[in-house]
Image (tube, coloured by chain):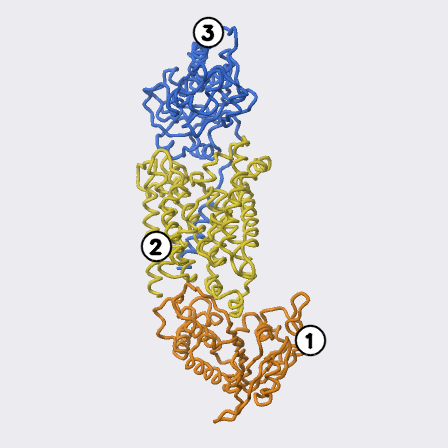
């Protein structure tokens, strides 16, 4: 679904990303993990075409990614960013409705409004309709934007791509897992999700494959079981850890310290 | 809704573009008037012109005047305000048969609007000199087809002939004041400069051109013997005492001797039929 | 919500119509017949009486100019606020109006030779084009100074505006001082504005500019909303951000330039009209853009009608009236801003 050969990104003389090569398949939930400064968000920004990278090859669904028209790519790909605006002077439903902007010219039709309702229900933000956006908690704002991003990809196109940069920040435990289940539901319909996560254990539990990034390049890209070894994690994160299998599903659990 | 506006919009465009510019012939600077002017309802936008009209016995026909037309004081005409901010509508509301103004003061927009309305507009090139006043009187009288204007010209010439020279030319500084914060002096090229010279004196601020802000340094270098002001100007400063409080005034000869002369604004600088009388009075006051 | 918007649209439209009809009857000149009679007589005979001249050549163009100017300034202000993501951005505050005035004054002073050769319509076109250039240069300068990485530094934005207004004000003042060109008029015209010189040519030109400009700006509702998420986010929704920014800058410069070239500076409308609407509709540009045009037209028409009737036969410069109407609102903006900063 995504094929990237030899991608790099530099600012002046510094390489923030180098030698990025990978292939991602349909229906995969890929977690991107790594220590701070490893290049996780930068990589996601490149996949989202937010910054000017250099590459030999970057295809999205077997077409060169740059060949997609500006107006059609929002139906295939959406991105949830780490930092959201603090002040948006709009009603909360209107903010979620923005995810449907690629679908209507001037007036949203009934189906768009129903999709907004559906995703606000799924992210448990329906009760926020009468509140001011500025007064919402960080987590509530986050869930609102998640609803927006999911609403954006609600269509009949096959094999969509969802990019999420640390979507679980500010969310309490229950909402974190609910969000992960929403992402999993999404990928189970043969769509792909690339999620930057801080929590290795969550990554281990939910990801089909893991991209472990370190010092601007990919350290390893494989199933969690294979990537998460004690030696590797301690070395990359520069902190001792113990890896032990999860009592119920045997996925690796990392305990630092 | 959008369609309605588009149609309305197109209608306006079509209408306005159809109304288009009737051919304007080039206009001469001094007057743009049809051959026959009716003089039963006159609007005068200049003080000197108004005075001339009154002297020609048509004061009763003046229906509208500008703010500088203060003489004669009993004129029954609507005050239209400053000539620079008069609108065509206010003038037309008076149903004028002719409008008098100066080329300098009437703005081109107003000019065009009056032309379009077929209102005869007589624009006079006002020069601030004795000759200029005489030309203005002659022009106005000719337009009105009045022949009795010679006495006015003679009066000016006679009055001017009585002006003797000073043994010692006083240095006169004209100060324009609208309150202590707004003070200007009259350099050369102003009507006041001309009046001072006609009265036989010397303009202390002749080195400057036009009206310039008053500065203490200017007062020191010019050191006038007499300060000349409009009545209203001195009033706005609170009389001679208020004037003396202005920085630098008290150190001038005029300040030390409290030699301050005031005259009515329009009388002093109007350059109308009373210009001769004004010069004589100024000369006498400067003794 | 849809209903609410419709209600407001209809109400504003009705108020506008009422104001328009009232304005036709108010003024220094009293008509002898009804407006309808005057108009139909004119069209039947194709000659002007005094009544019809005042109505058709003076009053109606002025009323139309007020409506167009108000709509143009209001929608320009709204669009600028969307572009800069700040409710204080308005043509007068950020200096565009002054830039337009400066270039218009320069054209009058230095282009007088050319101007006198041209027929009336093209004189107006030249003036508008030069004012547009002035507005555009100012806008470009202010935009470059005040934004980086898609974020607006509001302090720099306003200070650039202050600097430009001061500079252009000084130069314009100097030009008025030294120039003998009658057309340059007095400085009050440029700084406080007046619609008294309106005629059908000017109305025609302003109308074309406002028509084109507002059609383009009215389509920017979604993208201005999306910009509130951030430029990158808005791009992900499929919008061409750079192209939109350029378009808004050019169109606002065009509309403000044209309006200012003919009528002088008329302040506050671009700031206050969108602000009032925000109280009811938040910053939803889909709603703000069309409603601001209507409310702007209403406000300007009322202000102009008052300006030419309250001290008859003289006129109060319209800038004074918009300031009286706008300054209290501006103060409440500042109070609200302060409250938010706490």
Residue at which label 3 appears: B158
Graded by Cα atoms within 10 Å as few (under 14), some (14 to 19) or many (20 or more), the crowding at tag 1 reads: few
- The image quadrant where one finds the N terminus of chain A is bottom right
Label 1: chain letter: A
Q: What's the distance in space between the residues labelled 3 and 2, CA to CA?
A: 69 Å
Residue nearer the viewer, A144 or A17: A17
Of residues C285 and C171, the one drawn nearer to the viewer in this rendering? C171
Q: Residue at x 52, y 6 (%)?
A: B167
**Residue C188 in sight here:** yes
Q: Position of residue B43 (x, y in %)?
A: 39, 26
Q: Are marks 3 and 1 in contact (CB under 8 Å)?
A: no
Mark on residue C128? none
Q: Is residue C258 above or below residue B150?
A: below
Q: Which residue is mark 1?
A: A56
At label 3, counting other C-alpha atoms closer than 10 Å, the crowd grade (few under 14, some 14-19, many 20 or more) is: few
User: Is A248 left or right of C34, judged from the image as shown?
Assistant: right
Secondary structure of the residue carrying tag 3 is helix
For chain A, the rendered hue is orange
Mark closer to the observer (1, 2): 1
Q: Is residue B101 left or right of residue C30?
A: right
Colour of chain B in the image: blue
Q: Colour of chain C?
A: yellow
Does residue C216 show up? Answer: no
Disc 2: which residue: C12
In the rendered image, the quadrant that contains the C terminus of chain A is: bottom right
Q: Residues within 10 Å of mark 2 (few under 14, many from 20)?
A: many
Q: Please tell me if label 3 and label 2 are on a single chain.
A: no
- The Cα–Cα distance between marks 3 and 1, rounded to whole angstroms, is 102 Å
Q: On the picture, is C118 further left or further right than B237?
A: right
- Chain bearing mark 3: B
């Amino acid at each position: 679904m995504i094929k990237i050969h030899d991608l790099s990104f530099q600012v002046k003389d510094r390489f923030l990303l180098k030698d990025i090569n990978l292939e991602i398949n349909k229906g995969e939930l890929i977690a991107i993990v790594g220590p701070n400064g490893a290049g996780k968000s930068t990589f996601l920004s490149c996949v989202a075409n937010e910054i000017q990278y250099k590459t030999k090859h970057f295809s999205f669904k077997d077409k060169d990614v740059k060949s997609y028209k500006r107006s059609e790519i929002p139906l295939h790909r959406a991105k949830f960013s780490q930092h959201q605006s603090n002040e948006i002077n709009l009603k909360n439903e209107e903010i979620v409705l923005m995810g449907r902007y690629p679908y209507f010219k001037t007036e949203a039709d009934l189906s768009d409004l129903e999709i907004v309702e559906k995703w606000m229900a799924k992210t448990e933000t329906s009760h926020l309709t009468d509140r001011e956006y500025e007064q919402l908690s960080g987590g509530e704002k986050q869930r609102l934007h998640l609803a927006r991003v999911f609403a954006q990809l609600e269509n009949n196109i096959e094999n969509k791509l969802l990019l999420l940069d640390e979507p679980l920040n500010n969310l309490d435990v229950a909402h974190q897992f609910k969000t992960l289940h929403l992402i999993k539901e999404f990928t189970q319909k043969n769509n792909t999700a690339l999620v930057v996560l801080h929590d290795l254990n969550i990554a281990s539990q939910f990801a089909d494959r893991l991209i472990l990034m370190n010092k601007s390049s990919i350290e390893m890209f494989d199933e969690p079981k294979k990537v998460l070894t004690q030696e590797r994690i301690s070395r990359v994160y520069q902190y001792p850890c113990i890896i032990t299998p999860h009592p119920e599903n045997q996925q690796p659990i990392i305990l630092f310290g | 809704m959008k369609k309605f506006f588009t149609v309305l919009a197109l209608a306006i465009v079509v209408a306005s573009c159809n109304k288009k510019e009737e051919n304007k012939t080039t206009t001469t600077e001094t007057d743009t008037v049809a051959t026959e002017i009716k003089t039963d309802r006159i609007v005068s936008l200049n003080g000197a012109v108004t005075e001339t009209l009154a002297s020609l016995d048509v004061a009763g026909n003046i229906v509208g005047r500008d703010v500088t037309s203060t003489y004669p004081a009993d004129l029954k005409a609507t005050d239209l305000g400053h000539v620079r901010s008069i609108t065509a509508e206010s003038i037309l509301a008076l149903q004028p048969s002719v409008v008098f103004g100066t080329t300098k003061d009437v703005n081109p927009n107003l000019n065009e609007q009056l032309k379009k309305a077929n209102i005869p507009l007589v624009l006079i090139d006002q020069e601030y000199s004795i000759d200029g006043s005489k030309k203005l009187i002659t022009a106005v009288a000719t337009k009105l087809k009045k022949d009795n204007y010679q006495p006015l010209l003679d009066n000016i010439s006679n009055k001017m002939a009585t002006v003797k020279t000073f043994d010692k030319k006083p240095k006169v500084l004209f100060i324009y004041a609208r309150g202590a914060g707004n003070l200007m002096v009259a350099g050369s090229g102003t009507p006041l400069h001309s009046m001072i010279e006609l009265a036989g004196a010397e303009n202390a601020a002749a080195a400057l051109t036009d009206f310039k802000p008053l500065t203490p340094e200017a007062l020191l270098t010019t050191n006038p013997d007499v300060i000349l002001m409009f009545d209203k100007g001195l009033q706005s400063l609170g009389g001679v005492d208020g004037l003396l409080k202005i920085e630098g005034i008290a150190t001038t000869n005029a300040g030390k001797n409290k030699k301050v002369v005031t005259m009515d604004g329009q009388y002093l600088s109007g350059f109308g039929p009373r210009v001769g009388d004004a010069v004589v009075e100024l000369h006498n006051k400067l003794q | 919500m849809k209903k609410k918007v419709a209600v407001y649209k209809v109400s504003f439209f009705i108020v506008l119509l009422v104001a328009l009809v009232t304005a036709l009857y108010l003024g220094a000149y009293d008509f002898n017949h009804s407006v309808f009679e005057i108009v139909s007589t004119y069209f039947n005979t194709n000659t002007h009486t005094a009544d019809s001249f005042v109505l058709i050549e003076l009053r109606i163009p002025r009323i139309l100019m007020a409506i167009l100017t108000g709509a143009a300034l209001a929608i320009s202000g709204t669009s600028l606020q969307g572009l800069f993501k700040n409710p204080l951005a308005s043509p007068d505050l950020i200096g565009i109006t002054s830039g337009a005035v400066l270039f218009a004054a320069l054209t009058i002073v230095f282009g007088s030779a050319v101007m006198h050769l041209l027929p009336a319509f093209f004189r107006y076109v030249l003036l508008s084009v030069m004012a547009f250039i002035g507005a555009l240069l100012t806008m470009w300068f202010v935009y470059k100074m005040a934004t980086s990485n898609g974020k607006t530094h509001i302090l720099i934005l306003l200070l650039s505006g202050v600097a430009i207004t001061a500079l252009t004000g000084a130069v314009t003042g100097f030009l008025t001082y030294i120039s003998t060109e009658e057309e340059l008029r007095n400085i009050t015209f440029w700084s406080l504005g007046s619609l008294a010189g309106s005629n059908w040519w000017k109305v025609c030109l302003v109308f074309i500019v406002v028509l084109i400009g507002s059609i383009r700006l009215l389509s920017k509702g979604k993208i201005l909303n999306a910009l509130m998420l951030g430029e990158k986010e808005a791009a992900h929704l499929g919008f061409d951000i750079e192209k939109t920014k350029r378009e808004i800058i050019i169109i606002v410069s065009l509309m403000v330039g044209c309006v200012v070239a003919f009528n002088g500076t008329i302040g506050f409308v671009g700031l206050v009209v969108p602000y009032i609407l925000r109280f009811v509709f938040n910053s939803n540009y889909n709603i703000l853009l069309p409603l601001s045009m209507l409310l702007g037209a209403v406000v300007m028409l009322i202000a102009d009608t008052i300006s030419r009737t309250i001290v008859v036969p003289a006129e109060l410069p319209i800038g004074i009236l918009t300031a009286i109407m706008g300054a209290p609102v501006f103060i409440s903006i500042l109070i609200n801003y302060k409250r938010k900063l706490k």
